Amino acid sequence: MIHGGDAVTPAKIPFAGWKDVVFRVKNQVAKDRVGLLAAGVAFYGLLALFPAITAVIAISC
């Protein structure tokens, strides 16, 4: 049973409903490997930063 499943607004969701929401979000984050995805984006962003700086310096000179 989902607590607060018939709530019209988030303010109407009881505490037990929010516990269900947090539990489901935690499980979905683990299932989707969000941490690994964020690490990959940060890694490739860092790798792309240095060529971008080089290009900006080359264009501005």
Image: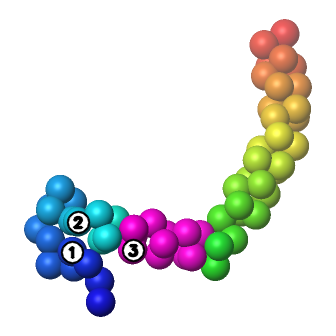
Instruction: Give percent across and percent down for residue 17.
Output: 30, 71
The answer for how far apart the CA atoms under marks 2 and 1 are is 6 Å
Q: Earlier in the sequence, mark 3 or mark 2?
A: 2
* Residue type beneath disc 2: Pro
- Cβ atoms at labels 2 and 1 below 8 Å apart: yes
Stretch of the chain drawn in magenta: 19-29
Q: Which residue is mark 3?
A: 20
Dot label at residue 14:
2
Q: Give the left or right position of residue 42, taking residue 51 as reference.
A: left
In the displayed structure, 39 sits above or below 50; it is below
Q: Which residue is mark 1?
A: 4
* Residue type beneath disc 3: Asp
* SS for callout 2: loop
| Mark 1 burial class by Cα count in 10 Å: few <14, some 14-19, many 20+ | some
Instruction: Give percent across and percent down for residue 18.
Output: 34, 65
- Cβ atoms at labels 1 and 3 below 8 Å apart: yes
Q: Earlier in the sequence, mark 2 or mark 1?
A: 1
Rendered residue at 31%/70% (across/down)? 16
| Mark 2 burial class by Cα count in 10 Å: few <14, some 14-19, many 20+ | few
Q: Is residue 47 magenta?
A: no
